[in-house]
Image (tube, coloured by chain):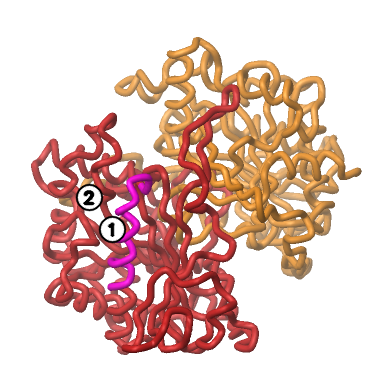
Chain colours: A red, B orange
Amino acid sequence: MPELRYNRLNDTWVIISKERAKRPHDYPTDWHKEKGDINKCPFEPGKEHLTPPEVFAVREPGTQPNTPGWKVRVIPNKFPALRPDEQFFRDSEDIHDKMGGFGYHEVIIDTPDHYKRFQDFSVGEMYLMLSVFRERMRQLYQDSSVYYVQVFKNHGKEAGKSLYHSHSQLIALPRIPKRIKTQINQCREYYIQKERCLLCDELKYELKEQVRIVHDNDRFTVYAPFASAFPFEMKIVPKNHSHDFTQTSDEELNDLAAALKTAVGKLAKLFDDPPFNLILHTAPPERNIPWDADYFYNMDRFFHWYIEIFPRMAIHAGFELGTEFFINPTPPEEAAKYLREKNL
Amino acid sequence: MPELRYNRLNDTWVIISKERAKRPHDYPTDWHKEKGDINKCPFEPGKEHLTPPEVFAVREPGTQPNTPGWKVRVIPNKFPALRPDEQFFRDSEDIHDKMGGFGYHEVIIDTPDHYKRFQDFSVGEMYLMLSVFRERMRQLYQDSSVYYVQVFKNHGKEAGKSLYHSHSQLIALPRIPKRIKTQINQCREYYIQKERCLLCDELKYELKEQVRIVHDNDRFTVYAPFASAFPFEMKIVPKNHSHDFTQTSDEELNDLAAALKTAVGKLAKLFDDPPFNLILHTAPPERNIPWDADYFYNMDRFFHWYIEIFPRMAIHAGFELGTEFFINPTPPEEAAKYLREKNL
């Protein structure tokens, strides 16, 4: 029996196939496995001159910028989608609207080890990466032309990764992206109606039901969303209501690192290192949009930051692209069960 | 110089990379080329018993249903995402909303020839396929529980196609999908402001500017949209304002077939048969949504049906999935130039 489920946060519907539910062994495991040529890898320690100069790094004491000794290194993308030296402006071309290509596009090299896969990071290494996300986001939001910073990690070639060496990316935008606006609006509408946070409610319900829970620690819960658009999709949600990832404490970040390691570790074991995207969703600063105040003020009350993991084991084709309806061949209850039971 | 461009119809922004613009030879051409085993193909004439019984077909006179002699054959998908024998209902599960899995999921086998690629269809064969889309949509909209019929074609494995033998699909939904709702709303807002159709205006401007035009005939124009989300994306738009594809005349369908053949032919030649999705966008019937009348009434004035072709030569990764912002490495002006100049 198929079932249609509503994803309130994204305002999308998902078709959950129950009848012909795909079990883990129905998915491919022959992912692109080439490790890339370490001799040509520009992310290796000792080859710092091959990349643009670093804008931030976590380093061993006493080491100099753009030399070895770093644990996490942030550099401008050599082929940036947006550039900080472009002008910030809005313009038009007859009937079409456009903007200047201002922004930041940075690469966060989250390990000096070419061969280390993300799921094999220690909790400490995950923590370090997350703390660099937090720090660099704080820094970029100092620039008042930055409306939103999207942090993400593409893992595996099929998920859009072009270099093998593990890295994350961020793109700082001169505009609130549509999906964030949708989410803010959906959370706001919910709050206006109930004076409760949408994600707090969801988390409370999922913890009561337990069937979609993958992992739970003191400060974070990992679960398969009720209306997952991707098979084996996961959401990592802080238990304490908080709208802004950049305000996360070190203690919270440590529990997040543990939850993240568990989530990606289980996924990697279940499907032999499948491709996935990791995406951080957090509230933008309120300052930039006074002319659209309804949407953005009081986000601290109704928005709730979270991380989503989208495994890319099924292709979104014409139907999904045409409609923003999704077909998910594995019910999240089953996905959660397989993930929960997979030992690390 | 990167530039951000607004896609008014979809309410999304696209980053157009101008500086490091990718030219045709920068894209891969090593697409999945396996032709599938014809002996195992359930779409071959003579193997009609391997599929569910046909619901419609264009046949040679005197031939019987579910026997050879068909030119286009429509069958229920053997593994349907939605089913007509499911109940049509709306329901909830505590905080979550859901619906019954009612709907139709059909396969349109648009040629009996296993090896014929879509770009090699004659104009007559394209016409036949389009006329079957039109007919089957008309039939399905007789069912008042059908809110929207999405017709699409996945071409190539990387675009989500699972069987090699050329086919299209349709999914009839018990709900207006989000993307259609967005488009209707955007066109409506535009019309309220200007009392003009958004796509009529766009087409008029593009025909004046010429730089993004790929092909133009008496009744249809093919162009690369100003804010293309995919490199070498194309839109095929009827010149006469019309909101509803199912009302298209035979003469129009013939010109559409010619435009479509030109568009996919040029794309196939430029990139050695790349993967793409073909998606038909048309107004749903007004009858189902009286409680949300603002969105849907008078669509004949402000909505304009069209076909979009999304080449899948670049992967939408974490950034695109997280934000609904897109990065397009080839400006549509350049894409149109290459497509225009490619001889068939």
Q: Which residue is mark 2?
A: B96
Rendered position, A100 above or below A162? above
What's under tag 1, amino acid-wise?
Phe
Rendered position, A185 above or below B155? above
Q: In this view of the protein, can residue B53 be seen by the observer?
A: no
**What residue lies at 61% left-to-right and 19% top-to-bottom?**
B201
**What residue lies at 74% left-to-right and 43% top-to-bottom?**
B334
Mark 2 surroundings: few (<14), some (14-19) or many (≥20) residues within 10 A: some
Q: Nearer the viewer, residue A126 or B315?
A: A126
> Is there a contact, CB below 8 Å, between mark 2 and mark 1?
yes
Q: CA distance from mark 2 to mark 1?
A: 8 Å
Start-end of magenta stretch: A131-146
Question: In the image as oriented, which residue stretches furthest toward the left?
Answer: A195
Residue B72 lies in the magenta stretch: no
Residue A144 lies in the magenta stretch: yes
Specify whether disc 2 shares its chain with disc 1.
no
Tally the marks. 2
Point out residue A78 in the picture as x, y percentages from the top left corner. 57, 65
Q: Which residue is mark 1?
A: A226
Mark 1 secondary-structure assignment = loop
Considering the image in quadrants, where does the C terminus of chain B appear? top right
Point out residue A66 in the picture as x, y percentages from the top left corner. 48, 79
What's under tag 2, amino acid-wise?
His
Point out residue B27 in the picture as x, y percentages from the top left corner. 73, 60
Q: Nearer the viewer, residue B101 or A46?
A: A46
Q: Nearer the viewer, residue B152 or A223?
A: A223
Rendered position, B311 above or below B303? below
Rendered position, A302 above or below B223? below
Which chain is disc 1 placed on?
Answer: A
Which chain is disc 2 placed on?
Answer: B
